């Protein structure tokens, strides 16, 4: 009997040790932070966005294109002009290009019809630009040499000042479809004994490509 009581007392005196929750939590957090520290963090804002130097309308870029136009004399409907050629554009500033054109022309007129070559230089300002289109104003002048006089009572060498407006439209791969209208003047600036001149309205279209 005494031995049984002694066993019960010995069992009751065993110390109960609860689980240290705070220590376990600290150990878990420390392990988690160590794992996160080993994984590199990607900086999504540190990579700069590259911009292509050939983006349409950027200063310092070159383009070339093919153009065709048709004009009719405001005074005499029998006088018409067909024009087809190539143009080179250099953007001297954003949305402002200096354009050099070389074209062959065909003049159907009162008197002898004629053919010739026209070299031009002009400025084209895209004053309204959107993501996929632009509106522009343009003005310039050129030198025209023909096989017969233009008009029939004028001269074979003439100047060709012009001014107009138009639109460009993005058609993919940085190509642009262009349409426009302009006042097209032909005269010899009194460098000949006769200077009747022609005043025409030309409508034209073309496609422009990057170099």
Image: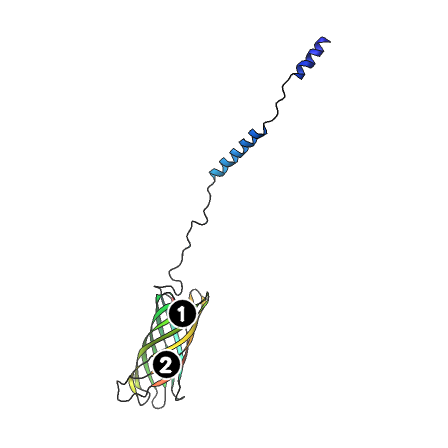
- Vertical relation: 152 (above or below) 209: below
The quarter of the rendered structure image containing the N terminus is top right
- Residue 103 is left or right of residue 37, and the answer is left
Tell me the SS state at disc 2. Answer: strand
Of pointers 2 and 1, the one earlier in the residue sequence: 1
Q: Residue 112: where, in percent of width, then height?
A: 33, 89
- Vertical relation: 173 (above or below) 111: above
- Residue 1 is left or right of residue 58, and the answer is right
Mark 1 = which residue?
126
The quarter of the rendered structure image containing the C terminus is bottom left
Q: Which mark is residue 184?
A: 2
Q: Residue 152: where, in percent of width, then height?
A: 32, 89
Viewer-proximal residue among 95 and 102: 95
Crowding near pointer 1: few (<14 within 10 Å), some, many (20+)? many
Q: Residue 128: where, in percent of width, then height?
A: 43, 69
The quarter holding residue 174 reads: bottom left
């Amino acid at each position: 009997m005494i031995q049984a009581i002694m066993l019960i007392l010995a069992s009751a005196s065993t110390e109960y040790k609860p689980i240290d929750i705070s220590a376990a939590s600290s150990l878990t957090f420390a392990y988690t932070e160590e794992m996160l520290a080993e994984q590199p963090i990607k900086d999504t804002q540190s990579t700069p966005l590259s911009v292509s130097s050939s983006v349409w309308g950027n200063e310092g870029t070159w383009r070339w294109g093919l153009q065709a136009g048709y004009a009719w004399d405001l005074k005499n409907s029998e006088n018409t002009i067909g024009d087809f050629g190539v143009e080179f554009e250099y953007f001297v500033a954003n949305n402002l290009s200096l354009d050099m054109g070389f074209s062959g022309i065909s003049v159907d007129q009162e008197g002898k019809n004629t053919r010739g070559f026209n070299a031009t230089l002009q400025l084209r300002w895209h004053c309204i630009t959107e993501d996929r289109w632009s509106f522009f104003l343009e003005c310039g002048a050129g030198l025209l040499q023909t096989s017969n006089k233009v008009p029939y009572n004028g001269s074979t060498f003439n100047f060709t000042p012009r001014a107009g407006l138009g639109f460009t439209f993005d058609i993919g791969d940085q190509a642009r479809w262009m349409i426009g209208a302009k006042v097209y003047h032909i005269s010899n600036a009194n460098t000949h004994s006769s200077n009747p001149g022609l005043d025409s309205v030309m409508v034209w279209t073309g496609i422009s490509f990057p170099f």
